[in-house]
Amino acid sequence: MKKFKYLFEDETEEVFQSNSEKELDLKQLRVILLVFSGLYAVFAVSDWFMAGSYKGMFLFIRFAIVIPIFIVTVILSFKPIFRKINQKLLLLNFLISGLGIASMLIVDPDNTIYYGGMFMIFFSGYLLIKLNYIYTCIGGWIIFVFYFIVFILFNKQINSNFIFSLMFFAGANFIGMIGSYSIEKSKRKNFLSSLIINEYSSELKLKLDDKIKEVNAINFEIVFALAKLAEARDKYTGKHIENVGQYCEIVARYVDEKNFDNIYGSKENYCKIIKVASTLHDIGKVGVNDAILKKNGKLSEFEYGEMKKHSTIGAEILEKIQNQYPSNDFINMGVLITRSHHERYDGLGYPDGLQGKAIPLSARIMALCDTYDALTSKRPYKSAFAHNIAVEIIRNESGRQFDPDIVEIFIRKQELFNEVLANN
């Protein structure tokens, strides 16, 4: 058997057997056993005319022993344990039905063709239910030996019918063994092929995961380098972009999954992307005049107009990178955030006057997080507001400046914002 198992290790053999149990087609098995029961019952009509004085014995074998075994096996097939013991139960079925037919042939040797034909039908049937090779051999040769010994003991002679039947049983066994061997050989080959494919797929997945991590690391470095450009122009930007990244991740974590754009994959992936992409929101400030960017005081109307251009400048910078790296999710989301994080839910924002859900989700999240950090941070022209005051200001802007759904998440999870603020 070791050679037949293709030198499976014990662990591999255990997995193979477990896999075979899971793949067992119980519905097909039940149908075959019920068909066997029907055939065994139908053949009883012939017994009535052919078995003579033994017909009572034949009917007893059929209806009191063999058919009940089939029915009990069908009933047991609905139990969870059946998958583990199915081969042993099927061997028992095979033995009982085969020994029953052999007994009929022993006491009525003149009907060799009829009862031998029955045995061939049932032997072939056990190939259909894929009885394991080892059990086919055990069952077939037990029936053969039983027939050989009991025929001689019962009939006290060896005649042509006995020789013919013996050859028939031996032939049926060899055919059954070859068929069962071929079926199990095919199953084992397919199993080994699946193991190789799974192993190759696992290795490929590991290599792919490593490549994805490598690409993501490169993408992150690109984004980080770009964010540093804005930080270099404005000393307040560095801590700001770090804070809003954490705030955006917090909000994204609690947004209803149905609202996510599926191009970013899972919610977990979306949260990772927005945490990084949000750092690009002020990249456009590299195009704003230093005198305006670093002014210690309120901006004039003209200066404010120039400052507002940072959203479109930033988007244009990122779009050029996007054209070169269209699969970079950080840049793709960064374009949306950078252009639209100053849009208002009521449509009075800039640069495009978008309203409501027309504003990208990432930009709606960013709008609130950007405002919270601006309110709670000290600037040359203002003092930092306390957390609770910032919360009230944002609450009052729900439905006007901010998406009500985003505000609702912010209010529920404000303690997480406060923890980030406390660590500054």
Image (spheres, grey):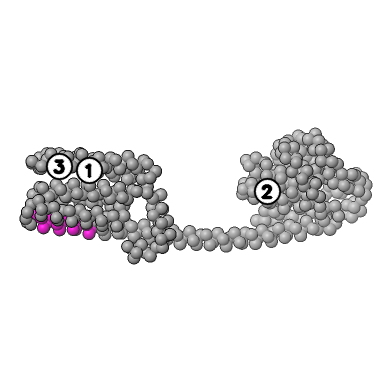
Please report whichever mark, 3 or 1, sits nearer to the chain's N-terminal start.
Answer: 3
Say if the magenta span includes residue 277: no
Q: Residue at x 28, y 55 (%)?
A: 135
Residue 26 point in image, percent of width and height: 35, 45
Magenta-tinted stretch: 161-175
Dot 3 amino acid type = Phe
Dot 2 amino acid type = Cys
Q: Is residue 223 visible?
A: yes
* Residue, disc 1: 66
- Magenta stretch, main secondary structure, is helix
Dot 1 amino acid type = Val
Residue 373 point in image, percent of width and height: 81, 45
Q: Which mark is residue 271?
A: 2
Q: Residue at x 73, y 57 (%)?
A: 223
Secondary element under disc 2, as helix, strand or loop, is: helix
Residue 262 point in image, percent of width and height: 62, 46
Q: CA distance from mark 1 to mark 2?
A: 65 Å
Please report whichever mark, 1 or 2, sits nearer to the chain's N-terminal start.
Answer: 1
Q: Nearer the viewer, residue 63 or 49?
A: 63
* Residue, disc 3: 58
